[in-house]
Amino acid sequence: MEETITFSGWEAIEEQTLTTNEEPKSGHTYTMYHGTYLRSANTIISKGFLPSKDGLLGAGVYVSRNIDKAKCYPLQTDVKNKVVFKLKVRAGKVKKIDCDNHPMQKTWHQNGYDCAWVPPKCNISSIKSGREEDCVWDPKRITVVDVACCVDDDKRKELRKLIHRMDGTDDVCSRCNQNKPAGRRHDFQRCWNCGKKICPFQRKHECKP
């Protein structure tokens, strides 16, 4: 006797066009992440990033395409006091820094570069994890587009609303949690099987028995 299997739903898979192992190309825009103190989140969204005065790659804003690296920052800080922003970064002219004591490790901007990139697993002694790192000279090249990680759900919603107010979008869709362009809406539809209202932009919907 044949057994009938019924399944309804979908899961959206976001295509990754560039992994953290691939060198960023000058002039391109990339999704990156930045971990910071939760208390600083509102100021960053409203006024932009304040560059670090120094660091492994000198002055600039430190970001990474590796979200797990961003989650580590700020160091030695409880996760409830952290937030990780999802960013769009216009890379500009990129300089690869792939060894200790690189001649342009902290002077890349003075040599005409907008961004410095440390490749993953390049054996720079101060990066124990081997994860990639980027430093952007001009904060205006960085746009906060979403909250990638925040354990406080109410605070996450508050920050997302602030992000959307700053970028001129209306609000966050209650179903898919994506921003809605000003003056437009996401039209909910009913699932043909379970009848639940769903948004076509939801990453996943599975009918519950």
Image: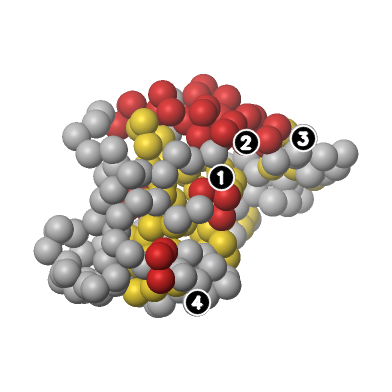
Q: Which amino acid type corresponds to the residue marked 4 in the rendered image?
A: Lys
Q: Residues within 10 Å of mark 1 (few under 14, many from 20)?
A: many
Residue 112, given in percent of the width and then of the height, sits at 46, 70
Q: Is residue 178 visible?
A: yes
Q: Are marks 3 and 1 in contact (CB under 8 Å)?
A: no
C-alpha separation, residue under disc 2 versus residue under disc 1: 7 Å
Q: Nearer the viewer, mark 3 or mark 2?
A: 2
Q: Colour scheme used in the picture? A: secondary structure
Q: Does the CB distance between marks 2 and 4 fall below 8 Å?
A: no
Tell me the number on the disc at residue 162. Answer: none
- Name the residue tied to disc 1: 144
Q: Is residue 34 above or below residue 58?
A: above
| Residue with the mark numbered 2 | 163
Mark 3 sits on what residue? 170
- Which label number is shown at residue 25? 4
SS class of the residue under badge 4? Answer: loop
- Decide which of tag 3 and tag 4 comes sooner along the chain: 4
The residue lying toward the viewer, choosing from 172 and 24, is: 24
- Who's the residue at 52% across and 27% down the image? 42
- Residue 28, percent across and down? 57, 71
On screen, residue 69 above or below 30: above
From the top left corner, tell me how far across and down residue 67 is, in percent. Answer: 38, 53
Amino acid type of disc 1? Val
